[in-house]
Image (cartoon, helix red, strand yellow):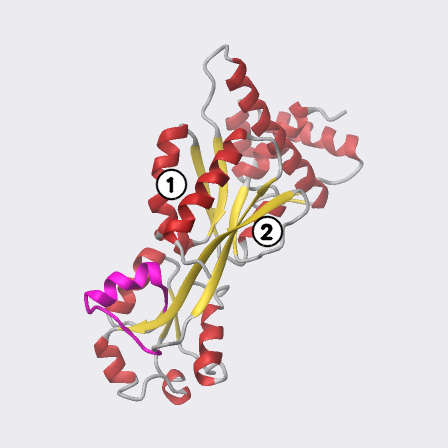
């Protein structure tokens, strides 16, 4: 039978990113944390985390972390239902892409948080990468572009975020003139990307040009809030979702460089398939409110 005192030490080290922070969280010495993890590894017969900076779970460590967090989630809800001493607020860790966080997700979540009294622990990554967090047990659910449910999880389609390519008018006149996008111009004009994982623009270039321009001079700007502002300021051209670009187009701050062309990014909600009331309420809220905020295709 698993010793949850030992599991809590493993979870604290992985969640806090080190033995020192874990010791402060659990009010133990670093030596006690190390001893508990060593004892857990001896019981399991395998190494559960790499002693790197920050520590990383092995495959066995990921399985145990996910199990511990699921049990912890259910125990908190059971304690809240049976009453007794004042209980801590339930924390829901969610993996989410930056564009969703900056647009529709940020608009629909305050009502849920205020109504249910939960705490959110949002972990941001590219929409193609967030499932990794769920697989590793780092989050209870995630927004992803992947439609297939992982083992032990459920999946619900939320809707679509169409992405188009934009620039400000001065930038368009300087780099693209009246011809719009062309391979020659795209190989010279500075492009703006969120990070090196971002590949939405590949699909747009294939649509419009038939290939990806190489070289592609690139600014990297990992901030969804500032991303659109940099495009409007003429620093480069880049991809924006309709939820973010439409007000700026109406204001005349940016123009569509390839009218009629867009990349539909379909979003899905993945979460653990466990009997958590808070998680079920969150899933129902996302499904209902996302249908209003996103496009159905």
Say whether residue 285 is left or right of residue 43: left
> Residue 25 appears at what percent x and percent y?
51, 27
Label 1: element kind: helix
Q: Residue furthest front?
A: 297
Q: Is residue 249 magenta?
A: yes
Label 2: element kind: helix
Say whether residue 204 is left or right of residue 110: right
Tell me where residue 188 sits by quadrant.
bottom left
Tell me where residue 190 sits by quadrant.
bottom left
> Residue 65 appears at what percent x and percent y?
64, 37
Judging by the rendered image, the residue that carries numbered circle 1 is 109
> Residue 58 appears at what percent x and percent y?
69, 45
Stretch of the chain drawn in magenta: 239-258
Mark 2: few, some, or many residues within 10 Å (few <14, many ≥20)? some
| Distance Cα–Cα, label 1 vs label 2 | 23 Å
Tell me where residue 178 sits by quadrant.
bottom left
Q: Residue at x 34, y 81 (%)?
A: 189
Q: Which of 290/7 is in front? A: 290
Judging by the rendered image, the residue that carries numbered circle 2 is 132
Q: Could you tell which of marks 1 and 2 lies nearer the N-terminus?
A: 1
Q: Residue at x 59, y 27 (%)?
A: 74
Q: Residue furthest right?
A: 45
Q: Is residue 195 magenta?
A: no
Q: Residue at x 74, y 40 (%)?
A: 47
Mark 1: few, some, or many residues within 10 Å (few <14, many ≥20)? some
Q: Residue at x 45, y 63 (%)?
A: 195
The answer to whether residue 83 is above or below residue 46 is above
Q: How many marks?
A: 2
Q: Are marks 1 and 2 in contact (CB under 8 Å)?
A: no
């Amino acid at each position: 039978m698993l010793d949850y005192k030992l599991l809590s030490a493993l979870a604290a080290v992985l969640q806090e990113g080190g033995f020192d922070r874990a010791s402060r969280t659990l009010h133990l010495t670093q030596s006690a944390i190390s001893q508990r993890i060593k004892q857990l590894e001896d019981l399991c017969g395998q190494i559960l985390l790499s002693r790197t900076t920050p520590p990383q779970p092995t495959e066995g460590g990921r399985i145990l972390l996910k199990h511990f967090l699921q049990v912890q989630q259910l125990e908190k809800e059971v304690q809240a239902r049976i009453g007794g001493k004042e209980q801590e607020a339930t924390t829901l860790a969610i993996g989410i892409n930056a564009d969703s966080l900056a647009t529709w997700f940020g608009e629909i979540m305050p009502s849920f948080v205020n109504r249910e009294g939960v705490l959110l622990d949002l972990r941001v990554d590219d929409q193609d990468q967030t499932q990794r967090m769920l697989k590793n047990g780092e989050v209870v659910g995630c927004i992803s572009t992947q439609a297939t449910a992982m083992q032990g999880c459920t999946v619900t389609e939320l809707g679509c975020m169409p992405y188009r390519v934009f620039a400000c008018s001065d930038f368009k006149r300087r780099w693209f003139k009246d011809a719009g996008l062309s391979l020659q111009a795209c190989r010279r004009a500075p492009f703006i990307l969120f990070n090196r994982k971002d590949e939405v623009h590949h699909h747009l270039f294939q649509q419009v040009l038939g290939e990806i321009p190489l070289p592609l001079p690139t600014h990297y700007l990992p901030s969804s809030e500032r991303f659109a502002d940099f495009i409007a300021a003429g620093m480069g051209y880049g991809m924006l979702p309709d939820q973010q670009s439409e007000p700026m187009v109406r204001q005349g701050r940016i123009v569509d460089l390839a009218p009629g062309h867009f990349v539909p990014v379909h979003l899905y909600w993945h979460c653990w398939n466990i009997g958590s009331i808070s998680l079920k309420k969150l899933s129902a809220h996302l499904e209902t409110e996302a249908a209003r905020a996103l496009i159905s295709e």
